[in-house]
Image: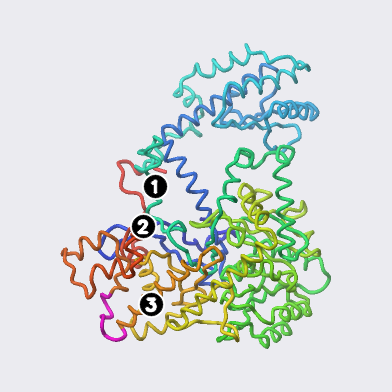
Amino acid sequence: MAVQDGSKRRLPGRLIGVSKDRRGDRALRLALQTREQHIRREKATSNVCTAQALLANMSAMYAIYHGPEQLREMAINNLRHARMIQTAAQHYGLNVATASVDAEGKVLSDTVSLYFDEPVVCRSLRRELMDQGISTGKSWSPNEIVLAVPTTFTLKLFVRIVKAFQTIAYKNHADADLDVSSKCWKAGFAQSSEELIKSLPASVRRESKFLTHPVFNSHHSETEMLRYMYHLQSKDLSLVHSMIPLGSCTMKLNGTTQMELIGTENTANMHPLAPHSCAKGYQKLFDATSSQLAALTGMDATSLQPNSGAQGEFAGLRAIRKYHEQQPGNKRDICLIPVSAHGTNPASAAMVGMRVVPIKCDTKTGNLDLEDLEAKCKKHASELGAIMITYPSTYGVFEPQVRKVCDLVHQYGGLVYMDGANMNAQIGLTSPGALGADVCHLNLHKTFCIPHGGGGPGIGPICVKKHLIPYLPHKSTQTPVSSAAFGSASIVPISWAYISTMGDEGLRKATTVALLNANYMLTRLKEHYPILYTNEQGRCAHEFIIDARPFQKTAGVEAIDIAKRLQDYGFHAPTMSWPVPNTLMVEPTESESKEELDRFVDAMISIRNEIREIEEGKQPKEGNVLKNAPHPQRDLILGDAEGKWDRPYSREKAAYPLPYLLEKKFWPSVGRVDDTYGDTNLFCTCPPVEDTTNSA
């Protein structure tokens, strides 16, 4: 993954490496996975947060299903079809742009560029093609038309293109010359695949092998592909098994009603660069969604362009910077950031060229230290550009003085950026605009139901007050933050459907239930675990933090041991060691029933009892059920390296610590992974192959 600001100093960790588990068996894991912004804060050179893993997986599955041979043949046919279009265009006296052909005048790729001396002729052909249902690509010149050949190219489509060429050439609407179409089509297939390849210049001809990994050469029937995909799926503990209580990530239900909309013909098959005249439905959808988001945030306008929350932060802060640059007076580049802020906040501020000044927080409640805030505002009065706050804070509490914070920053000439990562605790009850914010971003892949398990795709729109509208990234005067004007446009219908079907009352109820669920779990667990950061009434917002640090002294148990043991109980672990090291941040969302909440709480209480056994000397500090967790089937069947079960607990305790697991059991694929070994012995996931020299 590239560093977003172009710096070559750091590589954010999204590398899949080979390690080993406790028994020495092979295990795959994220290597070097600590996010740079979490360990370097304001010194970070990257705010990269969302990996577009879903899109990467879709592309990978496409490559797996087709394999290198079929992908090669598809590329050859695309070249073949492009040259058919070239031949037909030349037959009717149309010029193929020199940039798309080689020295012999042959098209080099699957794209044909047609050049016209007169723009009026170019516009006429574009209209004729549109009448035939063919939209043309964006070009740099009004005298040029770009046609990119799809893999679904057919003779019927080719005839429609030829008809448009003929109409322009003869200035009439006679039927297409089927003889021309037929001749070009037959001539195109008269050449063999090898002849087509040899016709390419050596400089652009690939001779090396690619996709040599066995997985790309094994699953080419629908049966085998489905079995492979379901095999991978069986290794994932997902929402189909249990709640995923990842604090700050909002892993809520992605309803079928919302999801099925993105698979329809009109939404799924739109080209990203299709002209607006071909995407009027999408335009209405964007307008409706933008208006919905602006209303829910108390703002005046929305840009859907940012592709993640981190990119939304970048776009929002850049709008603030552009605003200040247009105002008379001193340079305003100081950004105040509480220590409770998301890790991407200081990294985003550094990326837009702002200087980060941290603001202290109360160690008991997690609230902003207003005295420190006011002191920093006064100190940097002439340079204060913004403050970035998260509401509720990353500590899982509502900041009681949030309006005072906003007023104070405004008083000293700064603007307020509100991180919308926790908006699912605000919707229908309050809004960033009502609280005093000037700009906020929204994680549509959190609060508004777009799936983001596995890392994407994300959307992080920004909503702004009136005075920042001229500085939104989709305005023609501003540099975009994404190559697509509307970001991850194809999944916007999910959020639109969610908001539209829920309505005002439904959205408000979702917020209140999320708050209720979190506080119910907190109430049950606080008797067993220390809880960090609650308000004066002992309540939290939509999430809360369990402090595992005391157990390190009393039992040698850390947050990671609790997280690993939860797998044996059939649960995904909460967010671990963030924002506070050696803690667990729990967020149930509104999607879970009381029965599921109780099941998770019972699992946590059971684990607490296992910790007590260690504290009371009934279990050793090393080799106990927590330190050995999780327990895959292979571990239980084979035992230790010598094939024995010489542990101070039974196999039943390892696998079935609570009765519900006898009926509903998810088995982990590997045992405790050796992270240190994986980071210090970084191996590629590819197994050895005969020729790896040129493999891609």
Residue 230 tag number: 1
- Occupied quadrant, residue 648: bottom left
Query: What is the span of residues highlighted in magenta in the rendered image?
Result: 615-624
Q: Please give the count of numbered marks on the rendered protein.
A: 3
| SS for dot 1 | helix
Res 42 visible: no
Among the two numbered marks 1 and 2 on one chain, the one whose residue lies closer to the N terminus: 2
Amino acid tagged 1: Tyr
Outermost top residue: 179
Compared with residue 415, is residue 376 higher up or lower down, i.e. above or below?
below
| SS for dot 2 | strand
Compared with residue 129, is residue 360 higher up or lower down, i.e. above or below?
below
Residue 28 tag number: 2
Q: Is residue 151 left or right of residue 418?
A: left
Residue 88 tag number: none
Q: CA distance from mark 1 to mark 2?
A: 18 Å
Q: Residues within 10 Å of mark 2 (few under 14, many from 20)?
A: some
Amino acid tagged 3: Glu
- Occupied quadrant, residue 294: bottom right
Between marks 1 and 2 in the image, the one whose residue lies nearer the viewer: 1
Residue 495 in the image, given as x and y percentages of width and height: 63, 54
Residue 404 in magenta stretch: no
Among the two numbered marks 2 and 3 on one chain, the one whose residue lies closer to the N terminus: 2
- Occupied quadrant, residue 664: bottom left
Which residue is label 3 attached to? Answer: 558
Residue 621 in magenta stretch: yes
Amino acid tagged 2: Leu
Quarter of the image where the C terminus is located: top left
Between marks 2 and 3 in the image, the one whose residue lies nearer the viewer: 3
Among the two numbered marks 1 and 3 on one chain, the one whose residue lies closer to the N terminus: 1
